[in-house]
Image (cartoon, grey):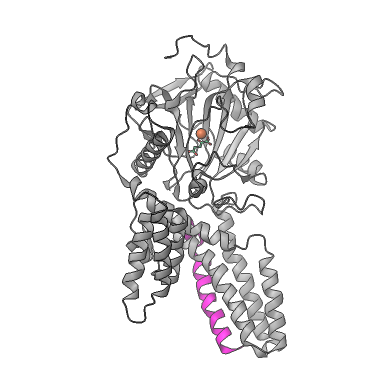
């Protein structure tokens, strides 16, 4: 699928193939006489790895394979260029190496060190959150996919990523795996000593240990939570969020207490939609088969060139910054007949107006979100948009913007005219084989993405106050590609369709 974010990753083996071809051609040419057997051997080795992945690029939907490919392109290739340039005195070979390295580094999609550490971080985040086993990983297995065992160097990169994320527990497990290897004949320990030093610094900085792995954590009541500090509340929500992500990993599409199925009618008599109540109070509903594959294709097509890294929401802790939102988004207006029709459907089903006006608009344009690893380090913001589709995530947040979250909040002027985001309608534009559920930590409810469905809920109470229980999050994507389209429906244009009530409890 050309519009998927993993598809950019899938272009890489073809790019590597072109690079290999340049070497092959050079070896065969008159100028190639100076190439050593060693260099030819390394290229043959790389050809083998390249053909393996070219034959089955869907392997790259797995973070382990993705990491290994990026590592090869960044590290192995740079060592090929550097060491052969150092070892040779042949001018023609030097010139070839020089120009070829320049050529490849100029390819927009060619990954950099940042992408490599981003891929390693994705692996750690996924292991941490879903309680996966590092000894399985070090044997080269990720979920149900098997491959060659990881090298110590690869493991060390992943360990470094764990340390950079401040994941002490994960770093400890990885260091033990490295130590077990060092005991074998020929094992090396210098790298381990360095990683261990880094780990002890982290511990001194007062980072907590292994706190999130608790599956039996029970949410304190909302009233008792209200008296707690902001930090304590945030931590409680995070723990529940992680718990919910684990619970929904392999659940059926809808996970919640109030499951109930019904035919949702519209004012067009024959037009009914299958609906499922995910949670009854506050209400969260999932609607099935509300957007067709053709409509989805058009929506992705329209956003493809417009995707840019999502701005990060508030970052509380420096090292957690990258955990909050790893995705790209594009804004789409109702400019085509398809988009108009897709919006009318939202109106038909919810009874709310999605009319877009210059001022006092009833709804926002679609925010199409694709979860990838661009922006992982917050460093990528200005560079070429890369989206390798690894470990995309959106941490717990509320969609309503009544309380400006940051000074200079960009939403404030819009808020004055159109009111808050009364309701959220979210189309799911892809299936996600593993991970990537939308979860509501305070309600114990969750929705697994299914192409063609949509979720709907109100962010405000009838009194106009924000509904704090609607905190929700997108779980990290373990495998596959995730796309959603948000339609936020505004308050003022819908005041008669959803009248306000004075009772703050409603
Ligand atoms: O991707 C998801 O599941 C949630 C997305 C979301 O909450 C948002 O974009 O506001
Ligand atoms: Fe949201």
Q: Would you say residue 143 is visible in this rendering?
A: no
Q: Residue furthest top?
A: 502
Name the magenta segment's main secondary structure.
helix
Q: Residue furthest left?
A: 216
User: In the rendering, at what x and y percent does residue 292 appear?
Assistant: 54, 36
Location of residue 355 by image quarter: top right
Query: Would residue 424 be found to the left or right of residue 184 on screen?
Result: right
Q: Is residue 486 above or below residue 172?
A: above
Q: Is residue 448 above or below residue 83?
A: above
Q: Which residues are magenta?
A: 36-61
User: In the rendering, at what x and y percent does residue 327 appear?
Assistant: 55, 45
Q: Nearer the viewer, residue 129 or 220?
A: 220
Residue 220 belongs to magenta span: no
Q: Is residue 397 above or below residue 114?
A: above
Location of residue 127 by image quarter: bottom left
User: In the rendering, at what x and y percent does residue 220 appear?
Assistant: 32, 30
Picture mark count: 0
- Residue at x-position 63% and y-position 49%: 381
Residue 60 belongs to magenta span: yes
- Residue at x-position 58% and y-position 73%: 77
**Which image quarter is the C terminus in?**
top left
- Residue at x-position 62% and y-position 66%: 15
Query: Would residue 357 be found to the left or right of residue 114 on screen?
Result: right
User: In the rendering, at what x and y percent does residue 461 appear?
Assistant: 47, 18
Q: Would you say residue 166 is visible in this rendering?
A: yes
């Amino acid at each position: 699928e050309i519009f998927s974010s993993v598809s950019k990753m899938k272009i890489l083996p073809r790019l590597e193939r072109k690079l290999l071809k340049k070497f092959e051609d050079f070896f065969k040419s008159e100028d190639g006489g100076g190439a050593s057997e060693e260099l030819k051997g390394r290229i043959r080795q790389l050809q083998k790895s390249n053909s393996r992945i070219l034959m089955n690029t869907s392997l790259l939907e797995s973070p382990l394979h993705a990491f290994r490919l990026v590592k090869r392109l960044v590290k192995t290739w740079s060592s090929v260029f550097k060491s052969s340039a150092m070892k040779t005195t042949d001018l023609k070979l030097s010139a070839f190496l020089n120009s070829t390295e320049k050529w490849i580094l100029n390819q927009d999609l060619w990954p950099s060190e940042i992408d490599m550490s981003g891929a390693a971080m994705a692996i750690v985040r996924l292991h941490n959150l879903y309680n996966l086993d590092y000894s399985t990983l070090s044997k080269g297995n990720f979920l149900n996919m098997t491959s060659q065992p990881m090298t110590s160097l690869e493991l060390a990169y992943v360990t470094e990523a764990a340390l950079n994320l401040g994941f002490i527990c994960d770093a400890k497990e990885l260091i033990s795996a490295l130590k077990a290897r060092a005991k074998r004949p020929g094992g090396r320990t210098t790298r381990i000593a360095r990683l261990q030093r880094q780990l002890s610094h982290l511990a001194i900085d007062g980072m907590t240990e292994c706190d999130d792995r608790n599956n039996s954590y029970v949410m304190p009541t909302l009233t008792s939570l209200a008296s707690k500090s902001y930090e304590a509340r945030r931590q409680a929500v995070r723990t529940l969020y992680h718990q919910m992500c684990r619970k929904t990993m392999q659940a059926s599409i809808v996970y919640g207490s109030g499951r109930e199925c019904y035919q949702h009618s519209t004012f067009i008599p024959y037009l009914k939609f299958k609906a499922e109540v995910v949670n009854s109070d506050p209400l969260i509903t999932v609607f099935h088969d509300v957007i067709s594959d053709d409509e989805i294709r058009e929506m992705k097509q329209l956003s493809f060139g417009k995707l840019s890294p999502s701005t990060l929401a508030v970052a509380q802790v420096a090292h957690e910054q990258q955990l909050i939102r790893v995705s790209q988004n594009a804004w789409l207006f109702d400019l085509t007949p398809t988009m108009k029709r897709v919006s009318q459907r939202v109106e038909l089903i919810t009874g709310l107006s999605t009319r877009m006006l210059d001022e006092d608009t009833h709804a926002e344009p679609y925010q199409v979100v694709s979860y990838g690893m661009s922006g992982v380090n917050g460093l990528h913001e200005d560079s070429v948009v890369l989206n390798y589709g690894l470990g995309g995530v959106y941490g717990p947040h509320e969609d309503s913007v009544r309380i400006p979250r940051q000074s200079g909040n960009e939403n404030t002027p819009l808020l004055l005219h159109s009111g808050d985001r009364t309701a959220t309608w979210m189309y799911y534009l892809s299936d996600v084989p593993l991970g990537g559920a939308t979860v509501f930590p305070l309600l114990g409810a969750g929705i697994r993405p299914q192409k063609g469905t949509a979720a709907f809920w109100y962010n405000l109470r009838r009194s106009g106050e924000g509904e704090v229980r609607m905190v929700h999050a997108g779980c990290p994507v373990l495998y596959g590609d995730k796309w959603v389209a948000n339609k936020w429906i505004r308050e003022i244009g819908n005041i008669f369709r959803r009248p306000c009530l004075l009772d703050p409890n409603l």
